[in-house]
Every structure is written in C-alpha cells, then in structure tokens.
Image (spheres, rainbow, N blue to C red):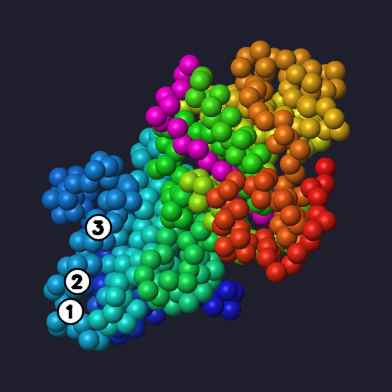
Amino acid sequence: MKNNYISTKQKALAINLDPQIYGSFAEIGAGQDIAAHFFKAGGAAGTIAKTMSAYDMTFSDAIYGTQQIKRYVSRQRLVAMLDHEYQLLIERLAELRGNSTTFFALSGTFSALNYHKTNEGHGWIGVRFQTVPNGPSHEVILHIKLLDNDNVLQQQAVGVLGVNLLYACFYHRQSPEDFLLSLMHDLNTGRIQIDMIHFEGPDFEKIDNRLMSLYLVKYGFSDAALFGPNGKNQQPSEILYKKHIVVVRGRFRPLINVHVEMLERGLQQFTQEPDIDKDNIVVLSELTLKSLKERDDDETGLIDEKDFLDRVDILCSMGQTVMISNFHEYYKLAAYLSGITKLKIGIVLGYPNLEYIFSEDHYTNLPGGILESFSTLFSRKVKLYVYPTLRDVEILNVGKFTLPPKLIDLLEYLVANDKIEDIRDFNAVNLQIVSDNVLNLIKHNKPGWEEYVPEKVTSIIKERRLFNYNPDVQDQDGQLAQ
C-alpha cells in the first residue's frame, strides 16, 4: 500500500481528471468537506453533477421520504439518500452521456460533535456507482465513529474519508484489503474508527463481508465488528442499543455440545433475573483475534481465513449473531458493551476463564491492578454465569474456587452482590468433552466424534469437509482423550 499512497488532493484531482467518472454528492450533518476537496483540487466540472445538503428534517423527508426508523443518522436514511440521488442521475443523464460515463452517488449522514460536546460523533457514508458505462450498480457502505474532540476537525476527517472512499471504489476495488487500508490515508484510528463495512454488486461477488468484519478488527479500525446469522455485517450500536445482552466467548473450533449447553443454560438463568425483559435480549457468540490464531503464542498475527469462515458458517447455521473483537480481557468486553447499552449484560464463561479473571498476573499493566479491572468489569449491570469444569475426577465451580487469602473476600463480595453465579443445571457427561480432542477426532475421521457435536453441525462438517474432515481416511481405533 505504501507504494500506492497518494494524498487526498491527488486523489480528488485524479477523479476529476477521469472523463468517465461523474456523479453527485449529498450530505446531512458534516459532509460538506467531501465535495469541497473536489472543488479545490481543480477540474471539478468534470466530476460533479450536483452537491446538496439537507439539514432541515422536513426538507429531508420531502426529498428522501420518511423511514420506519426515525433517526436521521441511520443506515436506512443513507440507503434512501443513495436510492434517490443515484436514480436521479440515471433518469436525467443516462440518455445524454450514459454510454461514456460511470455514474456515482456519494451520500452521508452524520452527527458531529455539538457545541456543548454532549454527544458522540458518528455517521453513515456510502457510494453507489457503476464500474462500466451503462453497467449495473455497486455499493459500499460504512459506519464510522468520529473521535476528534472538535467539530471542525471531525468535519475535516469526514472530508478526507469521503475522498478516500470514492477513490477506492474506482481504483482499489480489485483488492479488498487494499481498499480497506486506503480508507485511512491521511487519517488514523485516533480520529476515525470504522466498525461496519458492506460491499454489494457484481464486481464484489467474491468479497465475503464477514472477512471484511475480521479485517476491521485485525487492522485496528475498530475494536469489534458484528454480523448476523445471515452473514450480513451489522453496526453494533444499531443491534445492541437498549438491549439486554448475553455473550459467550469461545474458539468454537468446532462448536460442540458443551458450547451449546453453556449458552442455553446461561441464557435460561439470565432470563429468570427480575430486571430482564425476555423479549429484548440479543445473544452474541464472540470470537477474539487471539482465539483465531492457531497457537496462543503466535505473535505473527496470521489468521487462517478459511478456518475463520468455517467456524462462522457453523455459528451462523445455528442462528448465532457473531461478534469479532480485540478484547482479550473480559473487563474490556464489559466496558465496550456497557458503552452501548445501559441494560443488564450476562457473560457466560467456563470455570478456567474465571480462574484467568482472578489471576493478578494479567493486570500488571494497570495502575490499579486487579481492582481497576474489576471496577470496570463489575461496576455496571454485568453478571458472570460460570459453567463448571471437570478436573481429574472433581467438578469445579464457584463454590469450590480456591483463591489466595487476599482475594477470598473479593470473590465472596461479588457472589453476595449477585455479580457471579454458577450455572446450575448441566449435563455432567458434557464436562468430559474437550474441543481440541473433538477436533482431532474429526481430522482423523475417528469413529464416534458425531456424538459430541450438535447434529446440524455434524451435517455441515461432513457436507463441506470442514476442519480437514476426510471421509476417505478411516481410523477405527480413535478414542476421545480425557
């Protein structure tokens, strides 16, 4: 990418001097600087058919219609803007210059920092465009967080991002990673975060939007990204805002009966809490970047993308909403989710992870050590539901948790104040199942692995030959190691 880097002004000028590229800009809130870059670069008459701002809500509704979601900074409003502006281009200009022009409509709706700095800046921006004259349309949509502590700086950041986005649509669309990385030219993640990106159109058929979610987190553009059971990328706040959240973290390599029981039992106990609205719960299966590496000590950052998609295919087939995050520590996960919703959050985890949470060695980087992490993890409406583990011949749970004397009172305080609870109703047989052992049985096609995996997951593994499953390799002597 370094060899392909050019400045914002150079990008705007390159587009202006391309005789095929022609379109319109429309914005609500903080996008004036996008079109301004093209005007200032020179040759804008060759690119810009129209620019407009629709600030007044009545005017905006009259132009773009009313949406079911009344928020004007929303994906629905952005799509309505793209629909309207792109259709106008085709209606008014296709006959005149359609044979020689690739049309585009760039739209954005933003909430920049207000005068009193009481809001969080964010917005939606997208481009609908042709790649050949008279060709079908393509679309790229982003959701961004604006992090500058000044309204003008936020507007400037949007302006740079808009130029980068339009340039990438025409010059970087053959490489999804180059496309994504180019969006941060002349910017940094201290100014803008991108937590949702979606590609659509014939030229993007080979792009898997779930991989793009992974890239957002992998390259630090966002701490977390989300997609639904249908594989479509979602903006986290739109899915999680004012919702109760239950989240279970795992490697899910593969999803086995233990994972399913953990989630089902944890969710069951969560819904029995007196302050829970059962009809207002979102359940998340979380994959961390660390869990996507083959080895825990892998510092290369390399992730097997096929393996990632295999796991995701299984989770989505089970109706799961999947979150990818860079939150190795649980307190960071709690802080992120608590920043989106004020309602109660349930974190379902295994007993070994409770041991990890109470290990002081993991908080040496915090001035306040374990107490600082716990003040974040438990200060909001967060509760841990702990699934037991079998160690030797003993079932270990919160009641049998052994701690150094100085931490015993801390654990008792959290249990007494309803912050930590054992998962009570579980199948002891499932405690004998270890994911890595099941994976080994699948890889070598050893008999009996199917009984440790949900039936639907078994079918998918066999049909798609996931996790190196090969029915032609037979091993009759395999046993599930304990």
- Mark 2 lies on a secondary structure that is helix
Q: Residue 21 carries which label?
A: none
Specify whether 392 is left or right of 129: right
Relative to 272, say whether 209 is above or below: below
68 relative to 470, above or below? above
Q: Do the residues labelled 1 and 2 touch (CB within 8 Å)?
A: yes
Marks 1 and 3 sit apart, C-alpha to C-alpha, by 19 Å
Nearest the camera: 79 or 10? Answer: 79
Whether 10 is among the magenta residues is: no
Front-most of residues 320 and 30: 320
> Is 283 inside the magenta-drawn segment?
yes
Residue located at (61% from left, 58% from top): 461
Sequence order check, earlier mark of 1 and 3: 3
Left or right of 217 on screen, residue 41: left
Residue 246 in view here? yes
Quadrant housing residue 460:
bottom right
Label 1 amino acid? Ala
The amino acid type found where label 2 is placed reads: Leu
Q: Please give the residue where the numbered disc 2 appears in the rendered image.
A: 89
Provide the residue span drawn in magenta. 274-294
Task: Locate residue 124, reporting x and y percent.
Answer: 36, 53
Q: Is residue 274 left or right of residue 131?
A: right
Local packing at callout 2 (Cα closer than 10 Å; few below 14, some 14-19, many 20+) is some
Residue corresponding to mark 3: 81
User: In screen coordinates, is 240 left or right of 364?
Assistant: left
**Mark carried by residue 94:** 1
Label 3 neighbour load within 10 Å: few <14, some 14-19, many 20+: many
Q: In which quarter of the image is the N terminus?
A: bottom right
Residue occupying the point 25% across, 41% down:
70
